[in-house]
Image: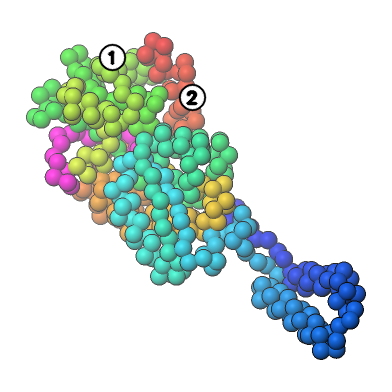
Amino acid sequence: MGLWQRGSKRREEPAQRVISNALKFWTNILRCCGPQMFNGLKFSSLRGFVSLFLVGMTLSVTIAACSGDGGNTTTASSPGATGGSAAKKEVELTLVSFAVTKSAHDKIIPKFVQKWQQEHNQTVVFKPSYGGSGSQTRAVIDGLEADVVHLALGFDVQKIEKAGLIEAGWDKEAPNDAVASRSVAAIVTREGNPKGIKDWTDLGKDGISFITADPKTSGGARWNFLALWNAAVKSGADDAKAQEFVAKAYKNVPVLPRDAREASDIFFKQGQGDALINYENEILLAAENGEKLPFVIPAVNVSIDNPVAVVDKNVDKHGTREVAEAFVQYLFSPEAQQEFANTGFRLSDLNGAQAKSLESKYPQVKDLATVKDYGGWSEVQKKFFDDGAIFDQIQGK
């Protein structure tokens, strides 16, 4: 089913039905009240009543004719309405996203609002919400009525889909598998990099400690785990050897905080660890803001893909499908992609002309894996992060 077809549910109400209902109404009035109304009425009063009857019928027919539109009517109360832009001058859109996208969306949203106003003569009022991707996912499932979600990993969107809020096939309704922004994993070091950390293998050496969040509770930490696993596999290790390397590396993690923000606080504010695994975009954004962090981008890396989706059940309830779908599409426009780049993200289309023009902005990655290389998020979750899976085995659980 096409992108715009999904939102085109309309309720038909022929003009004839309106006229018929009006006739029934006036007939019932005459039946019930006619004898009493005519009893003792003077001619002038009767003429007034007839005039009133004719005016009522005329209005009924006029309303029917105005609302006909070929027999198809989209009403604001219809749950399948395509956005209600013709019915009201203002529409409210709730965007739920993970924390590190805020700087980009702060620039993208006003541009979309202006564009929509010019093209549709309608004001869009955004209600954005930012937080950890996992906690945002739970909030949407528990009742936060997001119209659009932009999350750190596809598995989070899949959870919302399984909860019955997003229809299957959402990843095919926008360009590049609905991945609106990308990043890669980076290793932040102490000033001067005294431990000489250059790539993933160094994190498994004796005498090294590094900070990363718990992949059981943090979406970003799942990417970190996958980056370590991928590095072992790309060096020629089978699953047994890869698990051995990753287990050794995690022995060098003194504490597993719940999310990426807490991991950063432990590294920067508490001074723990020789290194911190973080998103590249966070580091580049910090640099744009004048905060220079020493870091390395390993040449063997993983593409951290951040998908976007319309929350079908909510947009149909709110009557916001049209504007929600338009906003999702706008996130892939050159203007929006430039704002993602300005805040440190890699572009959605890694091979497009716009991405090529920005190559010098990012450290080169020679071998970039994707989650698809490991069977997609359902397989990755089952193999590594479900209860009793490889991560629990590494932790001795």
Which residue is drawn at the image coordinates 41% and 34% (left, top)?
Answer: 135
Image quadrant for the C terminus? top left
Along the line of sight, which residue is nearer the eye, 397 or 110? 110
- Give the answer, above or below, for where 119 lies relative to 4: below
- Magenta-colored stretch includes residue 290: yes
Which residue has dot 1 on it?
251
Q: Residue furthest top?
A: 396
The first of marks 2 and 1 along the sequence is 1
Secondary-structure class at tag 2 = helix
Which residue has dot 2 on it?
382
Q: Which residues are magenta?
A: 287-305
Residue 275 image position (x, y, % from top left)? 20, 26
Corner quadrant of residue 42: bottom right
Corner quadrant of residue 291: top left
- Magenta-colored stretch includes residue 312: no
Rounded to the nearest whole Å, what is the CA distance between mark 2 and mark 1?
22 Å
Which residue is drawn at the image coordinates 13% and 24% (left, top)?
Answer: 196
Residue 13 image position (x, y, % from top left)? 72, 66
Residue 373 image position (x, y, % from top left)? 42, 33
Q: Is residue 308 visible?
A: no
- Give the answer, above or below, for where 167 lies relative to 85: above
Left or right: 28, with 163 as reference point? right
Graded by Cα atoms within 10 Å as few (under 14), some (14 to 19) or many (20 or more), the crowding at tag 1 reads some
Which residue is drawn at the image coordinates 28% and 18% (left, top)?
Answer: 255
Residue 33 image position (x, y, % from top left)? 86, 71
Along the line of sight, which residue is nearer the eye, 33 or 97? 33
Here the colouring is rainbow
Q: Amino acid at mark 2?
A: Lys
